[in-house]
Every structure is written in structure tokens, then in C-alpha cells.
Image (tube, coloured by chain):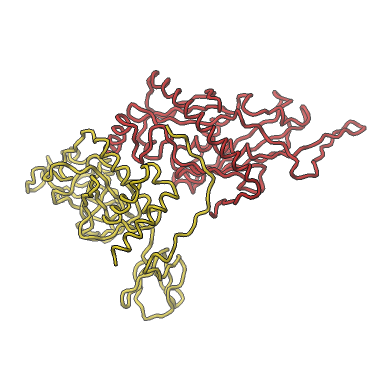
Amino acid sequence: MAAIEIRLPVARKLVVQSLAQGSDKHLVAPGDTITTDTGYMRGHGTYMGDEKLVASVAGAVERVNKLICVKALKTRYNGEVGDIVVGRVTEVQQKRWKVETNARLDSVLLLSSMNLPGGELRRRSAEDELAMRDYLQEGDLISAEVQAVFSDGAVSLHTRSLKYGKLGQGVLVQVSPSLVKRQKTHFHDLPCGASVILGNNGFIWIYPTPEQKDEEAGGFVTNLEPVSVHDREVISRLRNCILALVAQKLMLYDTSIVYCYEASLPHQIKDILKPEVMQEIVLETRQRLLELEG
Amino acid sequence: MDSLLFCLKASVTLEDLRVDGRGCEDYRCIEVETDVVSNTSGSARVKLGHTDILVGVKAEMGTPKLENPKEGYLEFFVDCSANATPEFEGRGGEELATEIVNTLYRIFSNESTIDVKSLCINPREHCWVLYVDVLLLECGGNLFDAISIAVKAALFNTRIPKVRVLEDEEGSKEIELSDDPYDCIRLNVENVPCIITLSKIGCRHVVDATLQEEACSLASLLLSVTSRGTLTCMKKLGNGSLDPESIFEMMETGKRVGKMLHTSLQKILDKEESLGTTRQKVGFLG
């Protein structure tokens, strides 16, 4: 039984800037002038004030030809078609479920967009409506894909594939959506023994890799068998590594998570969240990622 | 919440492993700093994971209470700042604040906690009143423990100026403050207890629950433990029920963990004291 550690605070040191190669980003705070040139089109996160372009959020300026927009560091999730999201069911309504996905409005999962067990394709009847609660209840976690975005910004989801559906045992980590890198696939089976779903909305689901490959994370039967200690240790370590990457503002994708996991192996799981250990691990991860790039 | 609850229950029930890798009796990393607010007699800031507490102690002259004319007393006030969580907006934090204040009064009502007789200047006329103000800056689970650690550290840091009572010929008393600003009396915080909150998850209990773990636990036991391992006060929180046997187990765990907490805390307070003026003050801009 370890002693309780109490320490004196230490002033935080700035992380070495020279490591980042593209470090000449134009960072702005709300109210900062981006440019006084009127030839640009204004994108998200900007507004026109007094003949100059002003930022409305805190983040980095991105310029694509004539379009200037500001990408904020910490935002709510803005849905786009094709994104993978992990959400929690908050309400069961007439023909749909309301899912919380860290967006400004609750996302909607229509009954017609949900897979029926057995993969049958038919019109949803009144019995299906009454049996909605057997599929998904309030508090259940699901993985889904964005089908459409309504005019008010609310997102419509669908689980029209066997890889989406209700999630079983695992750990949820909530981060800012801007830290999840957009990739071809967001379902990863990591070599360390766990699987991870990197939701574009910032919800990251870590779960033990299922043994049979046909039985994906979808479906409605949750596996409630106890998870082995070894798997649970791997999942806890991954969770702490992800929190360490988020604290140091590194983009989250499968390679960065795996490198961070490997860098954290010499330390105990609960030590990863200590500030000095966090910095050391993330520094090593950063160096390896830079080496990988070239 | 079901999947989360089950994962937590299983991991805590079968093995000594929580979601963040800690054991059932491990605390998160605690940071303590005293003397952060310059215009108080004593102050302390405690960071326990995502929980941030600031305590300030001001010593003022007042009249002793009628029932205890030869003693000074302590007054507690808790402010749940709206910065901590959106639920504290407006008057949302008042209920929690009243609960914390009542718990603190209960703990300090024991006469051996703080030597209140030393706070008396003139029986029935003048005494020192210590106003202890607690400010909740961030709410990350396990509030009571962090608040009790901060109150103990702030009382350790409190410096009350030495006063002399001068008698006039007519009999009226005058109070004279010492000229030397460093001439002050310190409080003996050896017997000040710390609160240990034990939350019951599944069939085991955990110390220092995070917000997620608190949401999953149906019942928790709040124990106030002194540095010698004596239990002075006990309170049950939550809607769930506790088995009498598990209450005994929780009490034993609480006493054990409490003794360790006190040793670590006293060590760090002594270390901070020994650094003296060479200590780099981090404060809020570190």
C-alpha cells in the first residue's frame, strides 16, 4: 500500500517550441484582428467589424485560397456527414432516440435508421415502436455514423451497419472534438490488446478486443462477462495515455496513442497522470512521431 | 450509465484496480500551497486531481460567546463559486455550501480540536474570532477531503498577532498590538482532523472518488479522523443503504488511510515551512 503523495506546486514550464516544425501558426483570441485586407471571404469563427476581419473564437487561423476561418481549440461538436460518433441516449421518443454527442443540440437517431436484429429490411411497424426501449434505453452508449445535418445544426445519425450499435463494457473518455484527427477509419484494434473507437465528436471509447471477429461491437446483446485483469490494466493505461496526450494538446489518432502507450510502459498506470511523467511521456511520443514523418 | 457502472463494479469488486489505475485506497496526486492570499492571516490552496479549493483565515477581534466566556471561536463560510461547475450558478450551490459548513462546525465543535482558550484575550470582553472562508474553485469529486486538508493547512499557516492588555487607572482596558509584525502566535493543528470520504461501489469501498465514481456510488461514508487514528465524527451521504459490517470495514479503512494522510500532510507543511523565504510562490499564475 503506497503512501499518499502530497507535494508542493511547481511552476509549469513551457514545452519546447522548437520541436514542432509547422509552429508558425497564427493564433488568435476572440476580438483579435486577423487581417485588414477586404479581399478575403470570411469562414467559421470570424466576423466583419469596422472594415477588418475579426476572430470570434480562440484558435488557429486557417487560410484556403481566399477563405479565412478560425479553427477553435475547444468547441462543441459540429456534425458533418460521414463522421463516426459515440453518443449516449438521453431520451426515447415516438419514433426516434435523442442522443447526446457533445454538440449544441441533441442528435437524433431515427427508428428507421436503426438496424433490426438479424439484419432484416422491412418497414418499421407499430410493434417496433413499442419495442424501442428493448433496443436502446436512456443511458446506453452507441456508436453511429452521421447521416444528415438539419438546417438548425442538429445531426441525424444512423447505425445501418453491423459495426455500429450499442456498446458493451469499456471506458469512455471525453475530449475536445478538435483533438481527434480525421482519418479513413476510426475503429482501431491496437496491438496492445484493446480496441478503440475515436469518435469525431470527442468521445473516445476503449474496450477489450472481442475474440470472435464476426461479432462486432454492434448488435444489441451486450457481453456482460467479467473482463480479465490484464485487459483492464491495458484499458486503464490507454485511458491515462489519452488524457496525457489531451493535456499536452497532441492530436489523437491510432499511431500517437500506440506510441504514447509504449512510452508509458516503464511507469505504473496511476503515475501516468502526474505532471512530470505526463510531460516526459508526451515528449517521447512527439519525438517518435517527428521521426516517423521524416 | 449501466455499462459504466458495471465496468466499475467489476473492476473494483474483483481486483484492486480502478479506471485510472489506482487501487481502492489510493489518493490522486495532491498539491498544497500555503500563504497564497496576502491580506489574510493564513491561507492555503489544495489541488486534488481536478478539485481546487482555496481557504483563507482572518483573525479579528470580537466578543466571546455567552456560554464560553473564556474562549475564542471559529466561524466557517463556504462559497461554491459558479466557476466550479454550471450547477452552482446563481443559488444552486447554497445547499452544498450549507452541508459543508454544518460538517465543518460539527468537526470543530470538539473542544480538543483547536485550543480555543488560547484565543481569549480578556474573559467576557475580547477574544480572537477566526473567520475561515472556503472557496470552491473547481469541482472534480471528493470535495470534503480536499476542504478538510485545505482548512488544516490554512490553520497551520495562520499567524495571529500578539496583543497586550493594558490596564488604565480608571480600570478601562486597552489593547496594544505588538510593534514587530512577525511577533505572532501560531495555532497547534495536531488534533485537527481530516475528512476521509469512502464511497461504496459494488461491494467494495473506494477512497477519493472522482466525479464519475461518485455518480456510480449509491452511498458514501464521511469520516473525520485525527492524526492518531481516532474517529471523531461520522456521517452517511447518499440514498443507498450500507450494511453494518461494511460500515465497520469502512471505518477501519478510514482510520488507516487517515493516519497516512496526516503524516504526509504534516511532512509537506513542515517542508514548506523550512523553505522559508527561499520558497518560490507559484500561486495562481504558475
In-image side of A23 versus B68 (left or right): left
- Horizontal and vertical percent position of residue B176: 82, 39
**Quarter of the figure that contains the N terminus of chain B:** top left
The tint chain A carries is: yellow
Q: Nearer the viewer, residue A112 or B286?
A: B286
Position above or below: A61 against B238: below
Q: Residue furthest front?
A: A266
Residue A28: which quarter of the image? bottom left
Q: In percent of the image, x 13 and y 45: which residue is there?
A: A213
Q: Which chain is red?
A: B
- Horizontal and vertical percent position of residue A73: 38, 60
- Horizontal and vertical percent position of residue A249: 38, 57
Q: In percent of the image, x 60 and y 38: which residue is there?
A: B270
Q: In percent of the image, x 20 and y 54: which residue is there?
A: A145
Q: Residue furthest right?
A: B169
Position above or below: A276 against A3: below
Q: Nearer the viewer, residue A202 or A278?
A: A278
